[in-house]
Amino acid sequence: MKFGLEQSIKDTDQQIKEVRRNAKIAPTLEEKLSFQKQQHELERTRNKQRKELFDRQDEIDERRETLIGQLESKLNQNMAIEDLFILSWQIK
């Protein structure tokens, strides 16, 4: 889950670099403005992706803590031996 989110952020970063490069070489002011708007939208998307990544990391950490707690409780179980019944027999 975490890897997929990180990969999508990297892809968005790459798109932002391409848009910046295109904005620098755009011949008209209209095209530059269009590329800058596109860059702004991509940056907004990247920020949302980063927030989602942090949220997912928190969720993963919570799950990990829960699992560790469950394992600790299983390790700390007390065992006791108790006689339930006694059989006696004779061999003839």
Image (cartoon, helix red, strand yellow):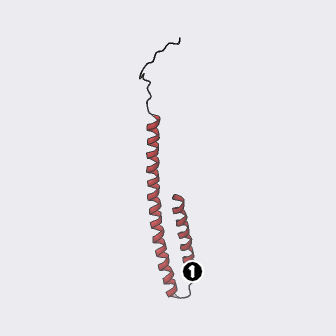
Instruction: State the residue position of label 1.
Output: 22
Kindly identify the residue that appears in the image at 43 percent across and 58 percent down: 55
Which one is in front, 52 or 36? 52
Which one is in front, 48 or 19? 48
Kindly identify the residue that appears in the image at 54 percent across and 77 percent down: 19
- Horizontal and vertical percent for residue 79? 44, 28
Kindly identify the residue that appears in the image at 55 percent across and 69 percent down: 11
With respect to residue 10, does 86 lie above or below? above
With respect to residue 51, does 58 lie above or below? above
- Horizontal and vertical percent for residue 63? 45, 50
- Horizontal and vertical percent for residue 62? 43, 50
Q: Which amino acid does label 1 sit on?
A: Asn
Kindly identify the residue that appears in the image at 47 percent across and 40 percent down: 71
Which one is in front, 46 or 76? 76
Q: Determine crowd level at label 1: few under 14, some 14-19, many 20+ residues with C-alpha closer than 10 A.
A: some
- Horizontal and vertical percent for residue 45? 46, 70
Say which element carries label 1.
helix
Residue closest to the far top: 92
With respect to residue 27, does 7 lie above or below? above
